[in-house]
Image (cartoon, coloured by chain):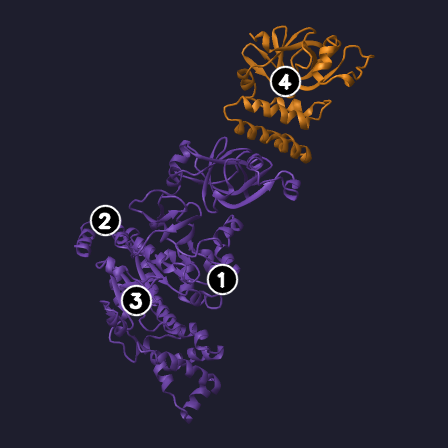
């Protein structure tokens, strides 16, 4: 049984088709973002409502309205001289012929004929398009007003860099946590998460201030929590696996160059760093910080052609960095090595920043670690190509506040810019979380495979997220009308068509149980044991 | 077969699009807008009463006022019994379709009705059956009638709706049909819808 809505009356492939609603269907029952099927003569089309309007066959009906207070007149006019219209963007064809059964839904290449009937999509149609939950697909939410599960193909998802966007407080963190759980269970990739606000490792907080379980509590055997701030972790009663310390000698000039904006360094000061590195070698930071106002210093500066004011500027910057408590003259252990060890064992690493939520610390650490991990991955991947050895496990690096790393000014220089552009080949991809996508370099944005976006209302942010998507204008109206919580628009590589979802629940005992049982197929006994432990 | 009591008159003038019938009894006219039928060879021709007159039998001889000394109107006819023979009631009906065998066609029959053909009022069942299609509205709206279609259409639909199981649904459906038909004639539509209630 289908619910007929109306008929196609005009349109084009580029802009979508116009549908005239039947008189029996109230325009007020419609909602932007809902799915419809269109029964063309030869094909079935699957599309989304992107706009809803009102029409009248004669302008006089609207200028000198008939007595609508009379229900009889109202009923007569409804659907004939005055009617509702829908704007539908056909996205896929789901015709029942053999080819499409094998290949699944195909992108549309034409439009349905005039007067094709338009129906609300049934549960079955939606399932046909988005697939059911299986060992590869992970349930992330339901479409609006439907109970069908929308599933993401996670192995497909992690093949490219992805982005999660949305204004602050729209549920980005919850969504990310759900996606991470999915990847953890179904994607055969490991995650390295730079957790700025300590939300993913042990426990997070919901909007209401309630604490929710995070990855380590749900999957203790698959997640390791690293921390930069042992004290904070201990206070929060987080069982950490490793305390990260960074030695002065580990900081490279490139790491400092990225901090130019946050440390307020001038361009010549950044140049000076490279010169100092050349002069002092590996231990440049300590030596440069130790330079005092003496003749000797002036001599060195003179030699290196560094102006005094530039040096002062640089020195202030270096002081800010060396004041960071986790930076020590000599690091007791090699953090990169430890992280890689865990990742190699298939254990996901969450790096908590504790109290150091300062953006300087975040950029410095994330960059520093990622660059080295990236180098390792690159090396191993090249080796595996040459020697037919095993490829390193696919790695997904999650970063928050991404526009700080990937803004057009520094995207070309940071390691994250490189990963976003090309690292797919080396089995490393990014999961970018950001609230200001317009701040991210357009080239990086264009390389993202799948974008998940919660409500955005800034025009520039919306434009940058939707750049290059077909049917952009239509999606724009959908995006700006998302509810401010628990709703998201997903489009790109991992879904056959853009889809608005109500994000699945996270935070109740029932939801944890569902996450755990979903992974049972692979987790096997471990998951069962976990459940036992959690719920007795 | 229609009963004798349903017989309302006899055709005295016929054309493709309409016919005029004289009533057997003075003033025994079918209501404006009602559905009547007549035999036309093998066909039953349907018409909708669109105009009626009562006047003198002889065109040149106009009736004169007679009731000055009478107490009531009835008394005039009683004291001049010839009046009911010198006056006559006539009505014209617009042909809106015909029946051939079991099926009803709502468009003009191949030929006009016959002179002296009997005209019957259609029984409720037949009106209901005729009302299943609303194609006849097109003939009604487009005809050049002595009385405006704005009057005939609502009158016909009101009468027809009374025979339907759901009169309101019938009127709404007819209203929608008219809205489509008269989309360019806003004022006419407005007038008709106003009279349909």
> What is the drawing colour of chain A?
purple
Query: Mark 1 against mark 4, which lies toward the viewer?
Result: 4
- Residue, x 55% and y 23% (percent of image)? B162
Q: Chain of mark 2?
A: A
The residue at which mark 1 appears reads as: A438
Establish whether labels 3 and 2 are both on one chain. yes
**Chain shaded orange:** B
SS state under label 3: strand
Task: Give the crowd class for mark 3: few <14, some 14-19, many >=20 residues within 10 Å.
Answer: many
Query: CA gap, disc 3 to disc 1?
Result: 27 Å
A494 over A443 or under it: above or below: above
Left or right of A490? Residue A181 is left
Secondary structure beneath dot 2 equals helix
Q: Earlier in the sequence, mark 3 or mark 1?
A: 3
Mark 1 lies on a secondary structure that is helix
Q: Give the number of callouts.
A: 4
How far separated are the C-alphas under marks 3 and 4? Answer: 83 Å
Q: Position of residue B192 (x, y in %)?
A: 64, 31
What residue sits right under mark 2 in the picture?
A520
Nearer to us: label 3 or label 4:
4
* Residue B13 seen in render: no
Q: Earlier in the sequence, mark 3 or mark 2?
A: 3
Q: Position of residue B63 (x, y in %)?
A: 79, 15
For the residues marked 1 and 2, what is the alpha-carbon distance in whole angstroms? 39 Å
Query: Mark 1 vs mark 2: same chain?
Result: yes
Observer able to see residue A174? yes
Residue beneath label 3, please?
A: A351
Query: Which residue is labeled 4 in the image?
Result: B107
Q: Chain of mark 4?
A: B
Mark 1 and mark 2 in contact? Answer it, CB < 8 Å.
no
Say whether residue A294 is left or right of residue B124: left
């Amino acid at each position: 049984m289908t619910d007929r809505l109306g008929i196609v009356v005009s349109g084009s492939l580029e802009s979508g088709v116009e549908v005239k609603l039947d008189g029996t269907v109230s325009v007020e029952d419609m909602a932007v973002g809902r799915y419809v099927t269109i029964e063309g003569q030869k094909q079935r089309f699957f599309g989304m409502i992107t706009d809803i309007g009102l029409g009248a066959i004669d302008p006089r009906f609207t200028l000198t309205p008939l007595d609508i207070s009379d229900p009889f007149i109202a009923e007569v006019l409804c659907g004939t001289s005055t009617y509702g219209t829908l704007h539908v963007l056909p996205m896929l064809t789901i015709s029942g012929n053999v080819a499409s059964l094998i290949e699944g839904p195909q992108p549309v290449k034409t439009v349905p004929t005039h007067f094709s009937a338009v129906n609300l999509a049934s549960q079955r149609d939606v399932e046909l398009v988005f697939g059911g939950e299986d060992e590869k697909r992970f349930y992330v939410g339901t479409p609006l007003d439907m109970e069908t599960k929308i599933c993401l193909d996670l192995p497909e998802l992690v093949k490219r860099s992805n982005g999660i966007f949305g204004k602050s407080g729209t549920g980005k963190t919850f969504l990310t946590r759900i996606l991470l759980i999915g990847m953890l269970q179904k994607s055969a990739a490991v995650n390295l998460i730079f957790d700025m606000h300590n939300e993913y490792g042990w426990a997070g907080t919901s909007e209401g201030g309630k604490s929710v379980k995070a990855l380590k509590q749900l999957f203790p055997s698959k997640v390791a929590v690293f921390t930069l701030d042992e004290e904070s972790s201990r206070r929060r009663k987080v069982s950490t696996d490793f305390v990260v310390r960074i030695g002065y000698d580990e900081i490279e000039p490139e790491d400092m160059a990225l901090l130019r904006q946050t440390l307020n360094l001038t361009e010549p000061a950044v140049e000076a760093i490279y010169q100092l590195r050349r002069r002092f070698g590996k231990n440049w930071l300590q030596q440069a910080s130790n330079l005092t106002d003496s003749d000797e210093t002036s001599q060195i500066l003179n030699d290196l052609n560094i102006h005094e004011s530039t040096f002062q500027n640089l020195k202030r910057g270096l002081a800010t960095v060396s004041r960071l408590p986790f930076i020590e003259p000599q690091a007791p252990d090699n953090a990169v090595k430890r992280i890689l060890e865990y990742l190699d064992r298939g254990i996901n690493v969450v790096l908590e920043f504790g109290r150091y939520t300062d953006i300087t610390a975040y950029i410095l650490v994330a960059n520093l670690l990622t660059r080295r991990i990236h180098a390792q991955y690159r090396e191993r991947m090249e080796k595996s190509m040459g020697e037919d050895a095993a490829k390193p496990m696919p790695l997904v690096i999650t970063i928050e506040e991404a526009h700080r790393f990937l803004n057009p000014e520094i995207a070309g220089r940071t390691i994250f810019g490189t990963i976003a552009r090309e690292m797919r080949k080396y089995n490393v991809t990014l999961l970018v979380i950001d609230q200001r996508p317009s701040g991210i370099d357009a080239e990086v944005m264009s390389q993202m495979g799948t974008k998940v976006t919660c409500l955005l209302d800034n025009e520039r942010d919306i434009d940058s997220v939707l750049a290059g998507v077909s049917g952009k204008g239509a999606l724009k109206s959908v995006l700006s009308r998302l509810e401010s919580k628990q709703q998201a628009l997903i489009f790109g590589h991992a879904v056959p068509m853009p889809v608005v979802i109500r994000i699945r629940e996270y935070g109740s005992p029932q939801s944890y149980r569902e996450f755990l049982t979903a992974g049972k197929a692979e987790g096997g006994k471990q998951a069962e044991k976990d459940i036992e432990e959690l719920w007795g | 077969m229609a009963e004798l009591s349903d017989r309302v008159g006899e055709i005295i003038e016929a054309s493709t699009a309409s016919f005029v019938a004289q009533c057997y009894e003075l003033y025994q006219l079918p209501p404006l807008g009602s559905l009547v039928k007549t035999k036309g060879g093998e066909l039953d021709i349907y018409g909708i009463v669109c105009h009626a007159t009562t006047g003198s039998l002889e065109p040149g001889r106009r009736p004169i006022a007679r009731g000055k000394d009478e107490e009531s109107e009835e008394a005039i006819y009683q004291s001049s019994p010839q009046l009911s023979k010198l006056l006559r009631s006539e009505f014209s009906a617009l042909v809106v379709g015909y029946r051939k065998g079991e099926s009803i066609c709502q468009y003009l029959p191949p030929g006009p009705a016959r002179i002296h053909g009997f005209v019957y009022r259609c029984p409720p069942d037949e009106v209901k059956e005729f009302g299943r299609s609303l194609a006849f509205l097109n003939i009604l709206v487009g005809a050049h009638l002595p009385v405006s279609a704005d009057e005939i259409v609502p009158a016909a639909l009101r009468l027809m709706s009374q025979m339907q199981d759901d009169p309101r649904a019938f009127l709404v459906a007819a209203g929608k049909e008219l809205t489509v038909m008269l989309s360019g004639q806003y004022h006419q539509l407005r007038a008709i819808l106003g009279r349909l209630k």
